[in-house]
Image: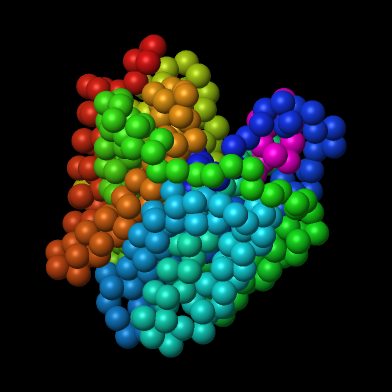
Amino acid sequence: MAESSTGVIDATVLNPAESDERTEPAWGAVVSLALGVFGLVTAEFLPASLLTPMARDLGVSEGIAGQAVTATAIVGAIAAPTMAIITRRMDRRLVMWMLSSFLIVSNLLAAFASSLPMLLLARVILGVALGGFWAMSAAMALRLVSMRLMPRAMSIILTGVSLATVTAAPVGAYVGDIWGWRTAFMIATIVGGLALLVQLATIPRLPPVGVASFRTLLEVLERPSIRVALLVVLLVASGHFAGFTYVRPFLEKVPLLHIETISLVLLAYGIGGFFGNIVGGIVAERSLKAAVALAPLLIAVAAASMLFLGASPTIAAASVAIWGFAFGAVPVGLQSWLVRAAPDQAESAGGLMVATFQIAIALGAVFGGLLVDNAGVASAFAYCGAATLLAAIVVFARGPKSVE
């Protein structure tokens, strides 16, 4: 999810009174969760910056290699709402240690992959770690600090997302060009190992205190506003990943940028996403509908600019930076919309959003790959622009009102 900063569903039934009575916040454990998020999002984003050499080395097309993104997304969509149920009898720290171990195994398999099936296996394991971690991290934070300190704890955890968004793609592209794409995954393995070591040292015992169920998920899905919100998630995420997965081939083939320049462009994308997340929150406080609608509208404008004016290196680079800014604002508005639409079942709504987002990533990568292989890279950006424009129209027509 990157994409990846949305709501949660956990097997724990949180006790606010118990949380408020915690006198010594476990800040070390909170930081360990931020490190875990950084490692997961870094691993998730690497294929976008390494797609060309990965495809060449494995002897497959770029569209086929892009399905490494699809595999992660599909498994993540399943793991997000089900991990809490599958592990409902386990201490939550053991679950987190297990998921971080999966991250390490995934990166090692990817680094030593000699075939596409081996790479896809690595990405399947990453999907389990990614979906499960996102599904449980915020609920764990509620048990590590008092309710009063919860906003600060989540800010620390989501810092991992911001840092990975800024650094993963450009650093991956640069390292891949200098030392090879496998080295980038080895570095990601080291990051995952450091996160696990900190988690082993800091996360306290967190025995399960409840039993998860699918019933609330079905109840939340019956609400019209939730269904509209999930449709918007589907359109925005599928459009984004249909285009962004193939941004490096586009920059290489249309504006003819060198790898050093592409790394800088991807860095601009990440920095744009960092500031987009901040601005998205500010706009959402004033007008939630504007926050939710303007982000996909900006993505549509950026995709159209690349499609029609992308031969200009300056316009292509500026469009990628605007794209990053817009996509950085997407999770803030959508999450706020879902929470407002289901304030009594916010965790279930968040779990549905995680699952829908991952499904949309898979659909976008699959469709984008088919378009790239059969109609050229530009066609993936055409779909991205159309899907995100439609999402903006849906929000303006059926989006969040001032009072849900």
Residue at coordinates 59% horizontally, 42% vertically from top-left? Answer: 210
Q: Is residue 48 left or right of residue 64?
A: right
Give percent across and percent down for residue 132: 52, 55
- For the residue pair 289 and 269, the one nearer the viewer reads as 289
Give percent across and percent down for residue 100: 62, 63
Residue at coordinates 45% horizontally, 52% vertically from top-left? Answer: 82
Where does the C terminus fall, quadrant-wise? top left
Q: Is residue 89 visible?
A: yes
142 falls in the magenta region:
yes
What's the image's color scheme?
rainbow
Q: Main secondary structure of the magenta part?
A: helix
The span shown in magenta is: 140-151
Q: Is residue 294 above or below residue 26?
A: above
Q: Is residue 92 left or right of residue 6?
A: right
Instruction: Find residue 244 and report its image quarter.
Output: bottom left
Residue furthest to the right in view is 24
62 falls in the magenta region:
no
- For the residue pair 355 and 289, the one nearer the viewer reads as 355
Give percent across and percent down for residue 147: 70, 28
Residue at coordinates 55% horizontally, 56% vertically from top-left? Answer: 87
Q: Is residue 344 above or below residue 310?
A: above
Residue furthest to the top in view is 403
Instruction: Find residue 188 and report its image quarter.
Output: bottom right
- For the residue pair 319 and 283, the one nearer the viewer reads as 283
Q: Is residue 93 above or below residue 137?
A: below
Q: Is residue 126 above or below residue 138?
A: below
